[in-house]
Image (cartoon, rainbow, N blue to C red):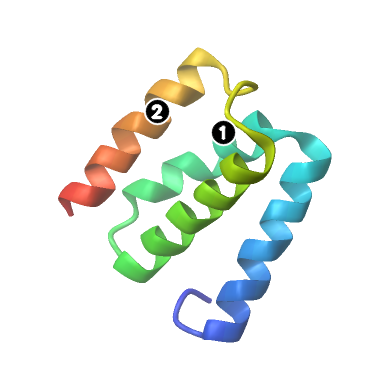
Amino acid sequence: MALDRRDYRQLVNTTVEIANKVGVDGIIGRIVEDLKDGTKPYMRMVVETIEKVVANLGASDINAHSEQLLIDRILYAFQE
């Protein structure tokens, strides 16, 4: 999915819309582990999704555990 541009956009937009319904923490908590995946296109897609969700809804609803995981996983993704 991450390699096909059309599917990539649809998946990111769908995830953002789901986040609008369930909240930031619900989505971030589920996709943050995917930042540890080894494939760069997929990690890029997850980072873009997180960026759009946080830009859209803000980060105030993210709990401390999810916030810590998010920071750890983003650092890992950028090191890769």
Residue 13, placed above or below residue 23 = below
Q: Is residue 44 left or right of residue 65?
A: left
Q: Which residue is mark 2?
A: 69
Q: Who comes first in sequence, dot 2 or dot 1? A: 1
Tell me the amino acid under the disc marked 2: Leu
Tell me the amino acid under the disc marked 1: Gly
Residue 38, placed above or below residue 50 = below
Q: Is residue 58 left or right of residue 50?
A: right
Q: How many marks?
A: 2
Q: Residue at x 68, y 64 (%)?
A: 13
Q: Secondary structure at mark 1?
A: helix
Residue 38, quarter of picture: bottom left
Position of the C terminus by quadrant? bottom left
Which of 56/1 is in front? 56
Give the Cα distance between marks 2 and 1. Answer: 8 Å
Q: Is residue 79 left or right of residue 60?
A: left
Q: Count residues near mark 2 (Cα–Cα under 10 Å), then give few for <14, some for 14-19, many for 20+.
A: some
Q: Which residue is farthest right?
A: 21
Q: Which residue is mark 1?
A: 29
Q: Residue at x 44, y 53 (%)?
A: 47
Q: Residue at x 48, y 57 (%)?
A: 48
The disc label shown at residue 41, or none: none
Whether residues under marks 2 and 1 lie with C-beta atoms below 8 angstroms apart, the answer is yes
Q: Secondary structure at mark 2?
A: helix
Q: Residue at x 59, y 44 (%)?
A: 55
